[in-house]
Image: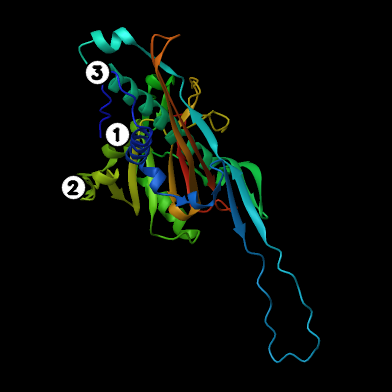
Amino acid sequence: MAINSGAISAIPVEIFATYIIEKLRKENPHLMAAVDEGSFVLGGSVVHIPQAGNSPSVVKNRKTFPATALQRGDSFVTYPLDVYSTDPVHLTWHEQNEISYNKTDSILNDLVQTLIEAVGDNILYSWLSGLKPSGGTFVADNIPAANILVTSGSAAAANPDDGQTGNRTAFSYKDLQKAQAMMNKGGVPKTDRYAMIESYQYQQFIDSLSSNQMAAYQGTADLENGVVGRFAGFAILERSSVLAFADDGTLRVPGEALSATDNLGSLCWQKASVAKAQGDIKPFQTTDDPTYYGDIFSALVKIGGRCRRADWKGIIAIVQNAA
């Protein structure tokens, strides 16, 4: 979908918002691979989910009367949505009228692309860091070491584009098989399993497949839904950035510059183990601003995510190791 804005008229807010939603879904297929808690969003800013308390006990052939009446202790899961907003972009009047291509379209497409990429990165981060359910409330936590698998391939040069130096163990198809076995052992449902593999690691995964494995893998792609293939029970998605960990195991914040010893990571999950909730989506624009001599555009999205399981079952990170 392209934004046909023209050079002098305002863009309908509804069209702009719909465009952002479509791009969010298309560029971030993992948002569709999580439990949607959007129906519990209050005021466009907070997720508020009622949780039923313990069910009453059942007594066979009751002989003691009166029975004791107990009140069910219901609770609520509440967490705020993060607010992602772009810096305003200024388009001057003479640019609109003198440049040979439609710069308005170019600016808006770039604005939206930057916004949705940041959202996609941070949702993955929020599934491993921040808040985790505990006794009906939320506590700060990070993915435990037991849920982090180390890549097991041969030594390969780190990607200098990510600021790394030295060698790392490569991502192998055997690492996905280990993740599969770990989920199977934990009783995680075998349906709706996904693996988001970082681009550099994805190439290593492809290189590790035999000719027969590769032929079978290529036949399982569903590119319309962002699935590049299926292996070991996982629908595989590929992304230029997924996760990164410091050498001491600390999870790096998306957008943070990586150091020479940091390690890239990929993520495996089962849909019921993670959640996302989308709130307000608001595009802003001022046309013919007399102080800027042109138009100003920006956009805002409220969205959040969380780990849904206190035991972390169904969430596994596969991380590089120094070789």
C-alpha span from label 1 to label 2: 16 Å
Q: Nearer the viewer, residue 268 or 50?
A: 50
Q: Quadrant of residue 71?
A: bottom right
Q: Residue at x 18, y 47 (%)?
A: 215
The reply to whether dot 3 and dot 2 touch (C-beta < 8 Å) is no
Residue 2 visible? The answer is: yes
Left or right of 55, for residue 125: left
Q: Secondary structure at mark 2?
A: helix
Q: Which residue is labeled 1 in the image?
A: 203
Q: Nearer the viewer, residue 241 or 286?
A: 286
Amino acid identity at mark 3: Asn
Residue 86, position as x, y percentages in the image: 46, 24
Q: How is the image coloured?
A: rainbow
The reply to whether dot 1 and dot 2 touch (C-beta < 8 Å) is no
Q: Which residue is labeled 3 in the image?
A: 102
Residue 231, position as x, y percentages in the image: 31, 50
Amino acid identity at mark 2: Ala
Q: Quadrant of residue 91?
A: top left
Amino acid identity at mark 1: Gln
Q: Nearer the viewer, residue 32 or 217?
A: 32
Q: Quadrant of residue 145?
A: top right
Q: Quadrant of the C terminus?
A: top left
**Circle 3 crowding by C-alpha within 10 Å: few under 14, some 14–19, many from 20:** some
Q: Quadrant of the N terminus?
A: top left
Residue 83, position as x, y percentages in the image: 53, 33
Q: Is residue 102 above or below residue 183?
A: above
**Circle 1 crowding by C-alpha within 10 Å: few under 14, some 14–19, many from 20:** some
Tell which circle, 3 or 1, labels the residue nearer the N-terminal end: 3
C-alpha span from label 3 to label 1: 36 Å
Q: Which circle, 3 or 1, is nearer the viewer? A: 3
Left or right of 220, for residue 202: right
Q: Which residue is labeled 2 in the image?
A: 215
